[in-house]
Each structure stands twice: as structure tokens, then as C-alpha cells.
Image (tube, grey):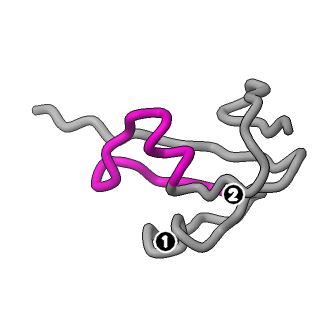
């Protein structure tokens, strides 16, 4: 099924959670924020939200610096 991640179409398997997607994208949990269909999620929700066809995600990675 297709979802949209940061404006691009991405094909994933049905019943994929946000947690599983994050793992597949090799992202570190402590440095990201996820918006799912215009709602910002807490990290604890990543395990419970099952993605559906047409869902839209915006994933932002935080970068430190000085």
C-alpha cells in the first residue's frame, strides 16, 4: 500500500506501525518528531499507530550544533 512520507510516495506492507517504519528508515527515536495526518505524535504512540493507505507522515530529524 502507498503512504506519503515528507511529500513522497512510499510503498509499505499492510499493518505496518510507525515504529516499524522508523526502524526501516534507520532513524534514531530520540532525534525525531512525527506528524501523522496533521497530528503530532508522542514517541509512545509510534508502537500503536498502524498506517493505512493514503496516510501522510512528516518526519523531522533534529540536528545539534553550535
48, above or below 29, in the image: below
Direction top: furthest residue: 8
- Find numbered disc 2 in the image and state the secondary structure of the residue it sits on: strand
Question: Residue 39 placed where, x, y %?
Answer: 69, 65
Which quadrant would residue 6 be assigned to in this image?
top right
Q: CA distance from mark 2 to mark 1?
A: 11 Å
Left or right: where 56 falls relative to 27: right
Q: Position of residue 63 (x, y in %)?
A: 27, 35
Q: Residue at x 74, y 42 (%)?
A: 13
| Magenta stretch encompasses residue 17 | no
Residue with the most extreme left position: 66
Marks 2 and 1 in Cβ contact (< 8 Å): no
Would you call the spot at circle 1 few (<14 residues within 10 Å), some (14-19), or many (20 or more)? few
Residue 41 horizontal side relative to residue 53, left or right = left
Q: Which residue is mark 1?
A: 42
Which quarter of the picture shows residue 49?
bottom right
Q: Is residue 47 left or right of residue 31?
A: right
Q: Compared with residue 24, is residue 18 higher up or lower down, i.e. above or below?
A: below
User: Which stretch is magenta?
Assistant: 20-36
**Quarter that holds the N terminus:** top right
Q: Quadrant of the C terminus?
A: top left
Classify residue 36 by image quadrant. bottom right
Image-based side of 59 in relation to 8, left or right: left
Between 41 and 44, the residue placed more toward the observer is: 44
Is 22 colored magenta in this rendering? yes
Residue at x 44% of width, y 43% of height = 23
Q: Residue at x 70, y 63 (%)?
A: 50
User: Residue 36 bears which disc, if any?
Assistant: 2
Amino acid at each position: 500500500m502507498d503512504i506519503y512520507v515528507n511529500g513522497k510516495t512510499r510503498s509499505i506492507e499492510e499493518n505496518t506501525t510507525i515504529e516499524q517504519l522508523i526502524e526501516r528508515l534507520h532513524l534514531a527515536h530520540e532525534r525525531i518528531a512525527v506528524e501523522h495526518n496533521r497530528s503530532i505524535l508522542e514517541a509512545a504512540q509510534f508502537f500503536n499507530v498502524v498506517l493505512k493507505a493514503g496516510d501522510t507522515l512528516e518526519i523531522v530529524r533534529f540536528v545539534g550544533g553550535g
